[in-house]
Image (cartoon, rainbow, N blue to C red):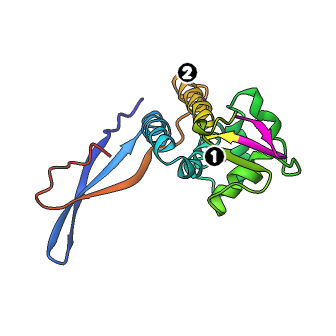
Amino acid sequence: MEEKIKTSQKVGSLATTGVVLAHTAIIKTPKEYIEKYLIKEIGEIVHAHQELSWVLMMAGIELLGRCVKAKIADDSNNELYFREGLKLFKSDYQKYNTDSNNPYDFYKKLRCGFSHLTFPKDSVAISERVNGSTNLSFFNGKLIVVAEDFYEDFKEACGKVIGMFGAGTIKPDFHYYGVEYYAFPGSTNDGNNL
């Protein structure tokens, strides 16, 4: 029996120093979450704030790998899930998805660099199309990764996961329960735009 879940449910209220706040929990399916946050919003950020978009794309790749492995709640094995997510990318990327001994390893140089430092580590550099850079090319011994091209391939990987959910080859192991929306009195926002 399939259970239908509303995408927005008012679940209660909260009194705080005399102010009552409406409490709305937003529940999204994996498809809705990937489309809104990983594809649409990261797409907007990559064009406006290229450098910041990398942090989000690295986390997004790991989430895609967790979806494929049906291990959303597992806090361990970040490397395993990132590598699984990167397998969804074009074959050109796979030579940088081997192991941490590879001097251009995306897990070690991009994912860990952006997750811990907010920039890539030594042998990998990032660029934008406006600079005339070619994605996955080399310059002065560094692997150049172009934000807009990487995002297009990231978006394609997101589409593959959405397709897997739709085909039933992977099960939706998560619902996006993480947002709690508090509307102040007089607000016209009901939380549905989150």
Numbered range of the magenta stretch? 135-144
- Asked whether the viewer can see residue 78, the reply is yes
Residue 101's disc number: none
Instruction: Please determine whether, in this image, residue 96 is positioned above or below residue 51.
Output: above
Q: Relative to residue 57, is residue 158 depicted above or below?
A: above
Residue at x-position 57% and y-position 51%? 51
Whether 135 is drawn above or below 187: the answer is: above
Whether residue 52 sits left or right of residue 22 in the image: it is right
Query: Which SS type dominates the magenta stretch?
Result: strand
Q: Residue furthest bottom?
A: 17
Between 6 and 155, the residue placed more toward the observer is: 155
Magenta-drawn stretch contains 85: no
The residue lying at 41 percent from left, 30 percent from top is 2
Helix, strand, or loop for circle 1?
A: helix
Indicate yes or no whether the magenta region holds residue 138: yes
Work out whether 19 lies above or below 186: below
**Is residue 3 or residue 36 the one in the foreground?**
36
Q: Which residue is mark 2?
A: 167
Mark 2 neighbour class, 10 Å CA radius: few under 14, some 14 to 19, many 20 or more: few
Q: Quadrant of the N terminus?
A: top left
- Nearer-N-terminus badge (1/2): 1
Total marks in image: 2
Q: Gap between marks 1 and 2, in whole Å?
A: 21 Å
**Residue visible at 51% across and 42% down?**
46
Inspect the image, locate mark 2, and give the three-letter code of the amino acid beneath it. Ala
